[in-house]
Amino acid sequence: MAAFFVGMVALCGIGGTAGAATALITEPQLEGPLSPEEATKLRAATRAALRVQHFDLTADSDLEVAFSGEPQFKTCHTEVCLERLGRLLDSQLVVSYGIKTAVAPGQPSPDWHLSVDILDVEVGAMGARVTLDCPRCTSAQAAAKLGELVGRAITQNATLPRGSLEVYSTPPGATVFVDGTELGITPYKRAVFTGKRKLVVRHLGYRSEQIEAVVDDKQSRRTDVKLVAGDDPLLESGGREKRPVYKKWWFKGNLHSDGRSCLYSEGT
């Protein structure tokens, strides 16, 4: 289903203009009293902030088409799902925001808790997670603060140092997980944020290899892996997968608890 839908997207031309920096705004996570008018105002502020940063915006209608083909994307907010959604719609950034409101008795305006996450699709990882409280704010004040927060998150993501990661395996065609997110197959080359990166390389019929790679700023780190034939300890007898690799202890904390239901493999 995923491979068919990717092909359909390519044929229909869904996504941003070729060569333009494109941002996708996902469904917001809302908690507490919030009117439809207030929700619309907050989304408009998010869109305006991205335009100020010179991003084209993926059309909401394209997002709905993606949801109709892959409905799990609508409620899945893990890096796995957001990376897939960004690539599916040809967006460079996936912007997620959350709003929590609470009104104390006798308080004229609610307290707002605002959050913005930026997933860098080229890297396949979160480049920014920022929050801001706006106590006793009107909806107009909260919208203005949300716009500022989006700008701050965009800047934070853009200034993160990054290099590139290359992974080669014998045999080739192995799946590469970087910090718990399935990002491609070998031979693999992709941008990555600098620092220690936790890799798992997995191939059907071979034992998985777990590697720690250190990537320096503006440098390329190459890793060569020779896989050993045999039963994979991550798989049960009969080839059924045990608890997904991104839920293992060495990836604990990288993804939300619902990551398993959101993972799929392209081309299946």
Image (tube, helix red, strand yellow):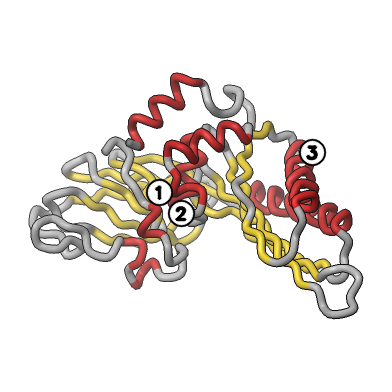
Q: Which residue is mark 3?
A: 52
Please report whichever mark, 3 or 2, sits nearer to the chain's N-terminal start: 3
Q: Quadrant of the C terminus?
A: top left
In front of the other: 214 or 172: 172
Please report whichever mark, 2 or 1, sits nearer to the chain's N-terminal start: 2
Discs 2, 1 touching: Cβ within 8 Å: yes
* Residue 83 screen position, x and y as percent: 48, 46
Q: Which residue is mark 1?
A: 221
In front of the other: 84 or 251: 84
Q: Which residue is mark 2?
A: 215
Residue shown at the point (74%, 41%) measured from the top left: 47
SS class of the residue under badge 1?
strand
- Above or below, 12 against 167 in this view is above
Q: CA distance from mark 1 to mark 3?
A: 35 Å
Discs 1, 3 touching: Cβ within 8 Å: no
Left/right placement of residue 78 relative to residue 114 reads left
